[in-house]
């Protein structure tokens, strides 16, 4: 298996003095420019920098994946250009995703520049945790404000089954490395799967409390050529009711700027979140779009419509064209998705690893 790892101390050849060329048009922020036809303002992007991962989670990708050839993936410079234009259009939060973003060679070069990007208020990263023992401290120093770590089980054998090739001890070590580095309010993400990990939800919450972490439970989404999810689906409400038999859950009005709805447990700083694309979808307040590693802008995770930014990036070195393409993409953002109708036969055939979650 090919795994692109990086050296945190290294700067790639030819990028030492690189800075994206930003036109005057892209520098001027017109308030409310990124507003879709339903009046929702886009202030948050999820930027995938690789489709590769060192795990093979069953709900995210096929066991034998064919990854994108290098020339079809945005370069680090192109990722920075896209981010810079979005920030110029009023985006204040960027989440770096993958695949596993920390297996992208020289990812720290990009992350360091995003961390110092004027106008960007919140740089966060989603990871499987396997590389954090090496990169937690450099990430914090680069300006990453918060980490989300995927963890669906606490059992080594079950973790190996879900991830196919993963080692849970790497994740535990990564969680500890994040704490030692100084990260606060690190959040665990757990996908709820009936018959796979539904007997561990209480244990996962207790683990989060003991480790002073937040945790979000995520309803499984029908993405990729993975059939039969209706039988494994668990709603947020069912899980919340189950947790309430062991923990006192108090509704909270707190928000992390994403789709999670949070609850508090008295005597603990941990927040318990639920992301409910099926049972309580969050489309009416959606404030985000996704950029894939190959430069596709998806206004909605649950739809196939996308704007291809890669040709614009490679044909037009003046960011005015890129800015226009991004603004125009607001016209194809739908009101919402309908995952419930896709549980047995997904309409969106790209894997989660392609879109970046």
Image (cartoon, helix red, strand yellow):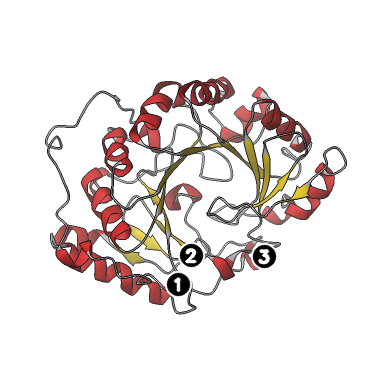
- Which residue position is annotated with label 2? 300
Q: Residue 340, which numbered label? A: 3
Badge number at residue 333: 1
Task: Look at 65% across and 60% down and name the residue there.
Answer: 343
* Position in image of residue 146 (x %, y %): 48, 38
Counting from the top left corner in percent of width and height, residue 50 is at 36, 43
* Residues at marks 2 and 3 touching, judged by CB atoms closer than 8 Å: no
The alpha-carbon separation of the residues under discs 1 and 3 comes to 19 Å
Please give left or right for residue 134 compared with residue 241 in the image.
left
Is label 1 in a helix, a strand or a loop?
loop
Q: Mark 1, mark 3: which one is toward the viewer?
A: 1
The mark nearer the N terminus, 1 or 3, is 1
* Residue at horizontal 23 percent and vertical 53 percent from the top: 81
Residue 289: name its quadrant.
bottom left
Residue 244: x and y in percent read 84, 44
- Which of the two labelled residues, at mark 2 and mark 3, occupies the earlier sequence position? 2
Residue at (34, 67) in percent of width and height? 307
Would you say the residues marked 2 and 1 are in contact, meaning their CB atoms lie under 8 Å apart?
yes
Marked residue nearer the N-terminal end (2 or 1)? 2
On the image, which quarter does residue 66 sit in? top left
Q: Point out the image quarter for the N terminus.
A: top left
In the shown orientation, is residue 103 left or right of residue 157? left
Q: Check the image and name the residue furthest to the front.
A: 267
């Amino acid at each position: 298996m090919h795994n692109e790892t990086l050296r945190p101390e290294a700067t790639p050849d030819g990028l030492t003095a690189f800075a994206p060329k930003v036109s005057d048009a892209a520098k001027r922020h017109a308030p409310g420019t990124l507003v879709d036809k339903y009046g929702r303002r886009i202030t948050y992007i999820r930027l995938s920098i690789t489709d590769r991962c060192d795990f093979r989670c069953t709900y995210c990708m096929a066991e034998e994946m064919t990854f994108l050839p290098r020339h079809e993936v945005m370069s680090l410079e192109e990722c920075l250009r896209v981010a810079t234009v979005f920030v110029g259009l009023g985006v204040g939060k960027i989440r770096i995703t993958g695949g596993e973003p920390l297996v992208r060679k020289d990812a720290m070069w990009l992350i360091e520049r995003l961390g110092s990007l004027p106008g960007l208020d919140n740089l966060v990263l989603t990871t499987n945790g396997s590389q954090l023992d090496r990169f937690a401290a450099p990430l914090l120093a680069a300006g990453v404000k918060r980490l989300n770590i995927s963890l669906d089980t606490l059992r080594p054998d079950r973790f190996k089954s879900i991830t196919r090739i993963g080692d849970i001890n790497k994740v535990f070590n990564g969680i500890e490395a994040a704490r030692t580095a100084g990260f606060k309010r690190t959040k665990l993400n757990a996908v709820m799967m009936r018959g796979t990990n539904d007997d561990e939800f209480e244990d996962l919450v207790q683990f989060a409390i003991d480790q002073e972490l937040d945790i979000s439970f995520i309803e499984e989404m029908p993405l990729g050529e993975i059939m039969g999810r209706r039988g494994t689906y668990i709603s947020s409400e069912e899980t919340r009711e189950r947790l309430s038999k062991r923990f006192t859950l108090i509704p909270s009005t707190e928000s992390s700027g994403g789709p999670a709805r949070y609850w508090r447990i008295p005597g603990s700083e941990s927040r318990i979140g639920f992301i409910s694309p099926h049972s309580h979808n969050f489309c009416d307040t959606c404030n985000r779009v996704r950029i894939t590693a190959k430069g596709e802008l998806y206004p909605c995770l649950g739809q196939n419509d996308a704007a291809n930014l890669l040709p614009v990036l490679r044909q037009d070195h003046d960011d005015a064209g890129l800015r226009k393409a991004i603004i125009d993409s607001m016209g194809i953002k739908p009101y919402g998705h309908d995952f419930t109708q896709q549980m047995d036969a997904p309409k969106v055939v790209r894997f989660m690893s392609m879109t970046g979650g």
